Amino acid sequence: MRYSNSRFGLGAATVATLLAFGSAHASAQANVGVEGTFFIRGGTVVVGTGERLEGASVLIQDGRIAAIGSSLSAPAGATVIDATGQFVYAGMIDSYTPMGLAEIGRVSTMQMSGELGQFNPHLRAIVAINTGSVMLAITRSNGVTSAITAPTGGIISGQAALINTDGWTWEDMAVNPNAGYVVNYPSAQGGGRRGGGFAGFGGGGDDREARAREQLEELKQEIRRAKSYHMAREGGLEDQDLVYESMRPLVSRQVPAIMRVNSQEDIEGAVALGDEFDIDIVIAGGREAWKVRDMLAEKNIPVVLSSIRSTPGAGLPYDAVYAQPGVLVAAGVKIAFSTGGASNARHVPYHAALATAYGLSPEDAWKALTIWPAEIWHVDDEIGTIEEGKLANLFVADGDPLDIRTNVNEVFIKGRRVPMDDRATRLYEKHNARPKHNR
Amino acid sequence: MRTSCMKSAGMVGGLLLTLIAPRGVDAQDLAITNATILTVTNGTIENGTLLVRDGKIAEIGTNVSIPNGVQVIDGTGMFLMPGIIDAHSHAALEGGINEGSESVTPEVKVQVRNDDQTIFRALAGGVTAAHLLHGSANTIGGQSAVIKMRWGKSAEELMFEEAARIVKFALGENVTRASSTAPDSLRRFPKSRMGVEHTLRWWFTEAQGYRDTWTAYERDGGFEPRRDLRLEALVDIMEGRIRVHAHSYRADEILMLMRVAEEFDFRINTFQHVLEGYKVADELAAHGAHASTFADSWAYKVEAFDAIPYNMAIMADRGVVVSVNSDSGERIRRLYQDAAIGMKYGGMSETEALKMITLNPAIQLGVEDYVGSLEVGKDADLAIFNGHPFAPGSRVEKTIVDGIIYFDRDQADTLEKLLRQHITTEDQG
């Protein structure tokens, strides 16, 4: 067997350094991308709007896409990357993860995504992103250049951030530091399913329902107060309340609530809540969204699907989870994919690949990994397609990114050329280089 | 909206009934024509035909004549591969998977149930056989079962009769209950990897003594020794009558178990999970141990932090027979995706990657003479995909066990059909 992934060919210098440092280096963090002017020449540019530009070049300058075209030539001093026979794609987005907030499972000090208390709209995930997380490099190595990182716990967990998977600081990584308020909509179903509604209280069905009703009233009360506060501030109130101040983008419809709901009843409840208080919502989870797809389409409410690497509820058709994305898109619902974790955000395109086997078109699958989440998170002027003026978040691959056999060979984030090594490649290099002992 | 929701709930109930009460199916002769046949052991045959007679593969090739009366499945545009084999599953087990009262319980056996929907859903992912193991709470957990996915048959009829007898061992965090917050006074021995090694050496020393007692009795006569089912099972392990499949993560514990086994003159057949197997791949190969691992799961606990998707490729490259398993009711539905990960990370060939879900798990379960590749004389356990199994957009159309179609997407309840029915019901209502 021969190691054929060309990423090592490109990073020869890095590999040499690695071998020199040996095992001590295996756990070290990958480097931040290198700034510069880059000219990606001669590839097929998959714009992301349905257009494919054969034999086109992309010029990256000052962190942005400066020009795209087939008659461009490289400016003096630009680093030229030959993409002949390869494809240039916009970076992919995983729309729900704990990236940078959680590292190794079962280690409490590495799971810092949740705060005490029930109402924490003022907590900001962005300020707690660990730029040293090994998940970041592993994620971007496969072309996933951005992710929603979301806080957990309580009824309002806090503000989720849309981050790039490369950068020197969390400020550098932020694409939208407040992409949405995570709301664990109080569910009478009592959660139970991973990624499901509000969990964590005991008692039987009646208790649970009563508790959920009570908590829903508390949630409404908080929003009501936030609205009053917002109006008072608009009217000249000078005293500030940190909690309600943090909710002003929500109640003024600049930032959506990310409603974590799965059952039809809870989705309908979350939509009704949005209507009642005139706030924008995004459904996150949405396992039964197919039952209310027309309503969601009509109200223009997007759905961030929880990991479709999951099983359908008892009694549902075997393909219910895989087929839902196609059903929702056909009904006119905007969707985005998510893995729900940080460790395999790298493989979010293979979630989309499963959906394409059961009815979603490859074109729509691509949009659900790029421009649709960019729109959902209000950053479509910055990322999501390969267009002039946008941040240069893109990658070069030798085939369809939805195909597991495809290799990603170059990744750019904010115009920086990201080194194609990470903790996994370093461990691979180290142990693959061990002399063979045929005892 | 409410009304239609109630209607759909009713229909879901109806679907459930059809799922747990499948049609009666009988073995028959059939032929799949014009398909791309991935034989695994003899390359790829384009526009090939595979003929099944009496549940076995009778002929494969481009020039197969189909006898009269044989059901023909048009395989145009389809890919035919051996049924997928999952070397690690906890599906279809009755009443818990751990006998957690003691750390060494090789005498207990898993109890299989036939009504777990996971069987049907696995079939829908092309799986035709699975190894059902105990959990990992015990150093030695008990004896597992290998089943064929004969959905609708009795628990007894699910058994893969020719499979090896296999016992589950476990090492590391689970068996030491590393996540336990109980005070030491309430903890069970062992609670460290060191303690696991001692537990193994202590019990196999006991078993050696037991074997000596019986050998002496059989040679010299006298009073018949008291029979001990636990020690008897351990002797069967030492004598190679029961294969060991060992849950493991870290390189140190993998190496430790091989050395303990060698001390007592037996071999570990297969390391399960074996996420750091790539660090001791040469030692695995030298010992003769196989590996059954995950494709991309990692970091869910400390001992899984060094797991890399290149694990499969490194081990295979160094001569280890590698399979990729599910250990989950979710992954069992898409093991073909996990096998493809081997091509992406470390550059396995397509055939090597396919072997990880066919021939290699068959070898690990002792059924390679019956399943795992498309060869004349083997069982007709087949998966038919609508495209290459590793390509995006490919799905399983039909899954066949012993020549019987147990999954057929055309016949199965699908979300699309449910929605169509739904609309029809609304129109009528």
Image (tube, coloured by chain):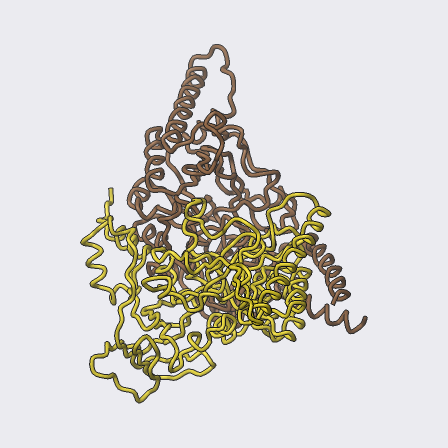
Image position, residue A360 (x, y; %):
55, 71
Provide the letter of the chain coloured yellow: A
Residue A423 position in % (x across, y down): 32, 55
Q: Which of B147 and A22 is in front in this view?
A: A22
Q: Is residue A72 left or right of residue B22?
A: left
- Residue visible at 61% across and 66% down in the picture: A227
Q: Nearer the viewer, residue B98 or B142?
A: B98
Q: In this orientation, does residue B58 appear? A: no
In the rendered image, the quadrant that contains the C terminus of chain B is bottom right
Residue at 19%, 59% in the rendered image: A16
**Observer-nearest of A355 and A97:** A97
Q: Colour of chain B?
A: brown
In the image, taking residue B415 as reference, residue B122 lies left or right, namely left
- Quadrant into which the N terminus of chain B falls: bottom right
Furthest residue toward right: B429
| For residue A216, side relative to residue B269 (left or right) | right
Q: As drawn, which residue projects farthest toward the left?
A: A20
Q: Which residue is drawn at 50% across and 29% down?
A: B105
| Depth check, front residue: A322 or B147 | A322
Q: Position of residue A48 (x, y in %)?
A: 45, 78
**Residue A194, position as x, y percentages in the image:** 56, 53
Is any atom of residue A37 visible in this view?
yes
Residue located farthest toward the bottom when viewing the structure as drawn: A71
